[in-house]
Image: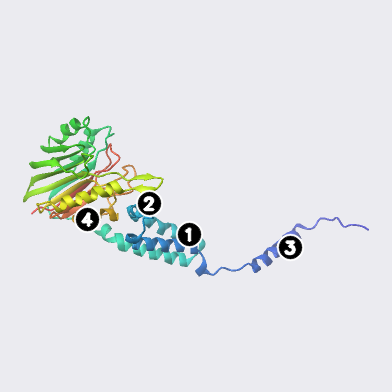
Amino acid sequence: MAVDVRPVPFRRVLGRAARRSSRRSSRRRVVPLWRRGWVPGGFALLTALALGGHRQVPDLGMNLASLWESALPWSGLVVLAVLLCAAVRRAPAAACAAGVLAAVWAALFGPVLLSGGGAGEGRGLVVITHNVSADNPDPAGTARALLAAHPDLVALEEVTDAALPAYQGVLDGELAHHTRVGTVALWSRYPVADARRLTIDPGWSRSLRAEVQAPGGPLAVYVAHLASVRPTLSGFTTGHRDRNLGALAQALDEEPLGRVLLLGDLNTAAGDHALAPITSRLTPAERGFGFTWPAAFPLARIDHILTRGLPASDAWTLPATGSDHRPAAARLRLP
């Protein structure tokens, strides 16, 4: 029997393949638009829930709530990621979920971002706090950068014995009054009295309390550098820092002066519920997010200026210095 070995025309092969593909496509189930992108949409809704109810997020024994509240502003990036997924997948449900998250984010952070400065209210009292870093390679240059903001008060943390003369050599020329306790120091344009160590941690000397004879009457100035938060195998160690915050809150309760200023590296972000013992007694001076750490690409605001009886008319961060923190500054209203 003869076998036909003539080649099959190429167009016929393409036609058969196209028909088979068409049959397979017709058998595929068409996914409705509202069901597309349910994974990114669900993630956006969970993020919105955790953002709006951040005070109820459990620690799970690892202080995860503190970490989450320190990163709250960055949850806005989830909106962009989900919108991108919704566009690629043509998923309107995911886009709606991103809109819900955006609304929650705006409700939480809109007032902070839209708060304006105090234009037309005079110079006031300009204050700066800066963790200058014990490893700062240029303390004199750091001090000159701070003086460029024309401050009336400058609080420094991590001031070493070796670097102190460099800071004094620059700051003393404009801010003649200063005091130092351990690794924290305060320079002032106005006389400083009753400066002493503030014992919020018996094992450390990283906090002080002083009275500054500012315009309008004496001002109690606290400078503090609280314990750091360290990652461990069991989570984030916040107990030491939280004990510092409790002791600092007790000292504020015992403060006899009506005008109070707290400056320092509190090693907790502005949105962290751990800061509540302080923010329930003092008002943060903030305009925008004011991230201060790490200096190269700031992710969190852990350096703070908080006041009582001294409303802030403006707040900002200064450019990076030789430290791993950026300086935080504020302008306070005086009578």
Q: CA distance from mark 1 to mark 3?
A: 35 Å
User: Which residue is labeled 1 in the image?
Assistant: 85
Q: CA distance from mark 3 to mark 2?
A: 61 Å
Looking at the rendered structure, the kind of residue marked 1 is Cys
**Label at residue 143:** none
Quadrant (top left/top right/bottom left/bottom right) for the N terminus: bottom right
Give the SS element for disc 2: loop
| Residue type highlighted by circle 2 | Met
Mark nearest the camera among 4 and 1 is 4
- Tell me the quadrant of the picture where the C terminus can be found: bottom left
Identify the residue at horizontal 29%, vertical 56% (top origin): 273
Answer whether labels 1 and 3 touch (C-beta < 8 Å).
no
**Label number found at residue 62:** 2
Q: Earlier in the sequence, mark 3 or mark 4?
A: 3
89 lies above or below 300 = below
Q: Which residue appears at 34% of the width and 61% of the height? A: 56
